[in-house]
Image: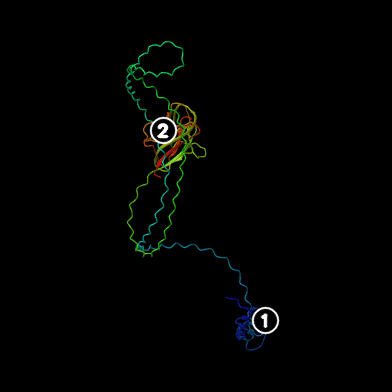
Amino acid sequence: MNRLNKLNLKKNLNTHDPELHSYKCKKAKKKYSNSCEPTSSNTTSDCCEKGKKCNGCERCDHCKRGPRGPRGPRGFKGPKGDRGPRGFRGPRGIDGIDGAAGATGAPGAPGAAGATGAPGAAGATGAPGAAGATGAPGAAGATGAPGAAGATGATGTAGATGAPGAAGATGATGAPGATGAPGADGATGAPGAAGADGATGAPGAAGATGATGAAGATGAAGATGAAGATGATGAAGATGAAGATGAAGATGAAPTNFTKVINYGGNNVGFQRIAGSPGALSNAIPYVDAADGSVVAFSGAISVNNLPVGTYLFQVCFDVINNAAAPLAGNIISTITLTTTAILSGTLIFSIRPTDVGAQPVRVSDGAAYAVTPNATVTWTSNIVGNPVTRNDAISIYLDMNVTQNAVYSLYISTAI
């Protein structure tokens, strides 16, 4: 119930004032019992005795109360009681039955075919392939037989001898007489047997390249003809209806393999370094192959002074333990053998492929043009048939003898990417 303000309380008291004046007490409270004085009136009810105080009955005229006083203001609202404990949670209701699955909607209409994309730009032209190895020089032809001697001419007749003159005084020296005709040559003896051919001399040094002749003068350019007048542009024709999309072309042939080149920096005996690596050898930092394929070629360039006679093995390996001192036989894919039969100096170059038959030549430059040397060859041995590599193989190069620090070797691997 809302609390009444003073104005509303006064208004209510004025409304009920007549009732308060006519109100009769039902039973006088003890504190009002002194309101009745002793009386001799015969109107005293049985509850009152003459000369005594009123007991508070309603029938006695002496027990009537005065008007009720105004109602006191309402007391302040008491403090809110503590919150009662929370009731126990009721049991969970039974799950309802699953509704039936809705019907599958009709499939949407197929989207319109996309426009054909513009043709892609032509790919860049691939780098030219490496030059093939120079063929071995052909053997010298046999020496031809000597030609037959020409016939001897006939001898002229001798002149007659004059009689000796008397010795006169020595006159002036006369002019020399005419030379007599030569006597006839004796018959030519039979030709001797041909001597045995001498040993072939060492090839002479290559002659210096001749100077390039001066270029001829460039002829004068002819006069440019006058440009013809541009014809008027014809009216644009109406755009034709779009033609129907042609059938899709057949799938092109599968891409061919691609060849990757890995360069290894020259080192002494042991694993070689991959060019550009942070310095670790190729067993610790190998080249990781990214697809299946095979080893297809190997080449070398060595700058050396007095390379000793010997057999140098370059072994192409896979998955060598990173701290191995040398590869195991099962880790070797291919072996390239460089054989020298004399001490060599200068820059040696060679290349070889597993498809080459027999030994291949080595060329040397030592202050002159590169030329094939008879003192070195290179061969290929496939330790694993087909020289295969597979994806994630760790590829490294191992050299079994010291060559030189100044060298670079290139390994060619063909894969599908």
Callout 1: SS:
helix
Quarter containing the N terminus: bottom right
Q: Position of residue 285 (x, y in %)?
A: 48, 39
Q: Which residue carries the number 1 mark?
A: 34
Please report whichever mark, 2 or 1, sits nearer to the chain's N-terminal start: 1
Q: Position of residue 32 (x, y in %)?
A: 65, 80
Q: Which residue carries the number 2 mark?
A: 335
Callout 2: SS:
strand
Q: Position of residue 369 (x, y in %)?
A: 46, 33
Relative to residue 257, is residue 186 depicted above or below? above
Image quadrant where residue 336 sits: top left
Q: Residues within 10 Å of mark 2 (few under 14, many from 20)?
A: many
Question: Residue 25 versus residue 124: which sits nearer the camera?
Answer: 124
Amino acid at circle 1? Asn
Q: Nearer the viewer, mark 2 or mark 1?
A: 2
Question: Residue 199 versus residue 44: which sits nearer the camera?
Answer: 199
Image quadrant where residue 142 sits: top left
Residue 409: mark in rendering: none
